[in-house]
Amino acid sequence: DTGVSQNPRHKITKRGQNVTFRCDPISEHNRLYWYRQTLGQGPEFLTYFQNEAQLEKSRLLSDRFSAERPKGSFSTLEIQRTEQGDSAMYLCASRDPGLAVTGELFFGEGSRLTVL
Amino acid sequence: AQRVTQPEKLLSVFKGAPVELKCNYSYSGSPELFWYVQYSRQRLQLLLRHISRESIKGFTADLNKGETSFHLKKPFAQEEDSAMYYCALKAPPGNQFYFGTGTSLTVIP
C-alpha cells in the first residue's frame, strides 16, 4: 500500500473552467477528508465522508464545489466555474476508525490548483 | 467555536539549542490534540498525539488545560528537525481536525 494517492498533482486552469481532483485513500480506511491549504495557512476542513456518506460540509464549500465518494472507496472533488480565489493546495486524508484512540489522519501529497 | 493558534510563523534556533513551538487552543470540551509535521517535499504526517504521552524524535508535548496550551518541545534541536509544524485539534461535530496556521522551524547548523 502506497498510502493516500491524489491526482493530478498539479492543475493549471483558466477562470471559469471546471476541474476535478481524485483521491484514493488507504484501502481499509472508511473515513475520508478533504482540506484546502492556501499560502501561509494551515489545512482548512472542507468535507468528510464515512464510507459513501458525506457527513459534513464546511461553509467554505460553496455551491460550486461538490464532492463524491460513490462506492466508499475513491473520492472526487469537483470545482465548477473556477475563480482565482480557488487557487490552493487541495489535500485529501483518510483515517481508520479502528484506530479511534490515535485518531491519526494519513494525508496525500495534495493537488495544487492554479487558476489564471 | 474550536480554534487553534500558533503565534509564531517562523522560528530559527541553532543546532543543539532547545526549541519550543507554541500552540494554544480554544475548545470547551475535552480536547484531543496532535502535532503534525511536513518536511520539505514530503506529505503532512503525524508527529505525536497528546493521548499517547509519547516522545517522538526527541519531541514531547504536554497538554496544559489550565493554559489551554499544547506546546511542542525538544531539548536539543537537530538540523533534520527543520520543517513545518502544525498543531491540530480533533473535535466534534464529525471529529474534524482543526489545524493551526503552522510554524516553520529552521535549525541553523
Image (cartoon, coloured by chain):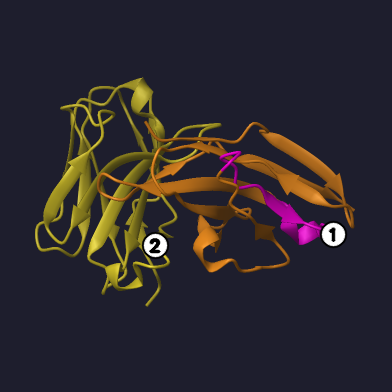
Q: Position of residue B19 (x, y in %)?
A: 79, 49
Dot 2 lies on which element? loop
Chain B appears in which tint? orange
Check the residue under mark 1 and report the chain it is in.
Answer: B
Give the residue type that dot 1 points to.
Phe
What span is colored magenta in the figure? B66-82
Q: Position of residue B98 (x, y in %)?
A: 42, 42
Number of dots carrying numbers: 2
Quadrant location of the N terminus of chain A?
A: bottom left
Chain A appears in which tint? yellow
Spatial CA distance of label 2 from label 1 is 28 Å
Give the residue type that dot 2 points to.
Gly
Compared with residue B105, is residue B101 higher up or lower down, i.e. above or below?
A: above
Q: Residue at x 73, y 53 (%)?
A: B73
Which numbered dot is residue A103? 2
The lab-note entry on whether marks 2 and 1 share a chain reads no
Residue sitting nearer the eye, B50 or B76: B50
Q: Is residue A115 magenta?
A: no
Magenta-drawn stretch, dominant element (helix, strand or loop): loop
Residue designated by label 1? B76
Q: Dot 2, crowdedness within 10 Å: few (<14), some or many (≥20)?
A: many
Q: Is residue B69 magenta?
A: yes
